[in-house]
């Protein structure tokens, strides 16, 4: 999971949900251009990705 705006309350809620529900995700704090790059890379490789903007 790639998320932008590391200081946003949604970022903390996402982090808490991953921990609380023991979800198999890695949360990456990022910029919007980096997030879009990761999305494109994942789609090109047939990988699943969650992006939150």
Image (cartoon, grey):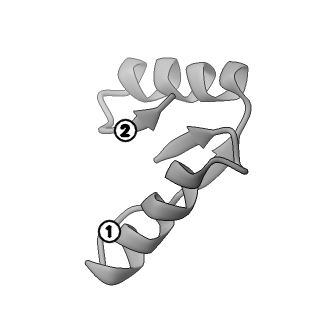
Taking 45 as reference, is 41 left or right?
right
Residue in front for this viewpoint, 43 or 21:
21
What residue is drawn where x is 70% and y is 49%? 6
List x then y, in percent, for residue 52. Answer: 46, 35
Residue in front for this viewpoint, 45 or 51:
51
What residue is drawn where x is 44% and y is 34%? 51
Q: Is residue 9 above or below residue 12?
A: above
Q: Residue furthest front?
A: 9
List x then y, in percent, for residue 3. Answer: 56, 41
Q: Is residue 19 above or below residue 24?
A: below
What residue is drawn where x is 30% and y is 38%? 48
List x then y, in percent, for residue 45. Answer: 38, 27
Which residue was labeled with disc 1? 24
- Disc 1/disc 2 C-alpha distance (Å): 12 Å
Q: Quadrant of residue 37?
A: top right
Taking 26 as reference, is 35 left or right?
right
Callout 2 secondary element: loop
Q: Is residue 25 above or below residue 53?
A: below
Q: Earlier in the sequence, mark 1 or mark 2?
A: 1
Query: How busy is the neighbourhood of tag 2: few (under 14 within 10 Å), some, or many (20 plus)?
Result: some
Callout 1 secondary element: loop
Query: How busy is the neighbourhood of tag 1: few (under 14 within 10 Å), some, or many (20 plus)?
Result: few
What residue is drawn where x is 44% and y is 59%? 14
Number of the label disc, if any, that sits on residue 49? 2
- Tags 1 and 2 in contact by the CB under 8 Å rule? no
Q: Quadrant of residue 46?
A: top left
């Amino acid at each position: 999971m790639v998320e932008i705006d590391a200081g946003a309350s949604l970022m903390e809620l996402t982090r808490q949900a991953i921990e609380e529900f023991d979800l198999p995700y890695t949360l990456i704090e990022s910029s919007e251009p980096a997030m879009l790059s990761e999305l494109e890379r994942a789609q090109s490789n047939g990988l699943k990705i969650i992006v939150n903007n």
